[in-house]
Amino acid sequence: MAKWGKFDFSEFRRLAESFQKAADGNVMDQFVRDLLAEMAMRSVNKIKRRMTDQKIVDTGQLRRSWQVGSVEKQGDAYTVEIYNPVEYAPFVEYGHRTGPNLTKWVQGRFMMTISMNEIERELPAYLEKRMTQKLKEILGGKG
């Protein structure tokens, strides 16, 4: 009959305890909230950098007015609102009619739309990097 030898399970127990502590301590909830808040701020920075054209920037009010709301959890989904309370922001973003009898069209700048599309493309790689960092943190720097 074969002899299997001895195996030390203490590392597995420590790993299981680390994961249990992370699950009990709402670590993932805070991770998601922090990640969304950071991505929202990155989005605002991208939007503002896109607003360098003199035709967009007259007083700078539109650029200064971008805001990020708080991260909210609704069921299993998290949301964060990025908005600009300036009255004419949607007209600059999407375009608008102008001139006599509103017969001319001013093309929208889509500074938010383009920035959000960029963030969406960058998110998988950024998420992987942050998840790896969080996992190393949970495991005590190992891994």
Image (spheres, rainbow, N blue to C red):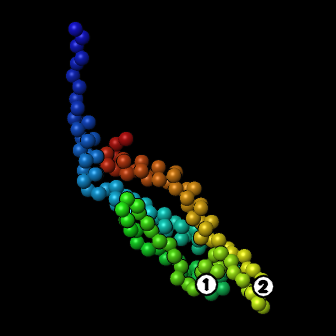
Q: Is residue 102 above or below residue 66?
A: below
Can residue 52 be seen in the rendering of this structure?
Answer: no
Can residue 143 be seen in the rendering of this structure?
Answer: yes
Asked if labels 1 and 2 touch by Cβ distance under 8 angstroms, the answer is no
Q: Is residue 69 left or right of residue 66?
A: left
* Residue name at image x 28 percent, y 51 percent: 23
Residue hosting label 1: 88
Q: In this view, does 102 lie above or below 124?
A: below
Looking at the rendered image, the disc whose residue lies closer to the viewer, 2 or 1, is 2
The amino acid type, in three-letter code, at marker 2 is: Thr
Image location (x, y in percent) of residue 70: 40, 72
Quadrant containing the C terminus in the rendered view: top left
Q: In this view, does 53 lie to the left or right of 115?
A: right
Image location (x, y in percent) of residue 6: 21, 22
Answer with mark 2 or mark 1, whichever residue precedes in sequence: 1
Of the pair 133 and 113, the residue shown nearer to us: 113
* Residue name at image x 24 percent, y 11 percent: 2
Quadrant containing the N terminus in the rendered view: top left
Q: Is residue 138 left or right of residue 55?
A: left
Image location (x, y in percent) of residue 132: 42, 48
- For disc 1, the neighbor class at 10 Å (few under 14, some 14 to 19, many from 20) is few
Residue hosting label 2: 103
* Residue name at image x 22 percent, y 29 percent: 8
The amino acid type, in three-letter code, at marker 1 is: Tyr
Q: Is residue 15 above or below residue 96?
A: above
Q: Residue furthest top?
A: 1
- For disc 2, the neighbor class at 10 Å (few under 14, some 14 to 19, many from 20) is few
* Residue name at image x 68 percent, y 77 percent: 95
> Tag 2's secondary structure?
loop
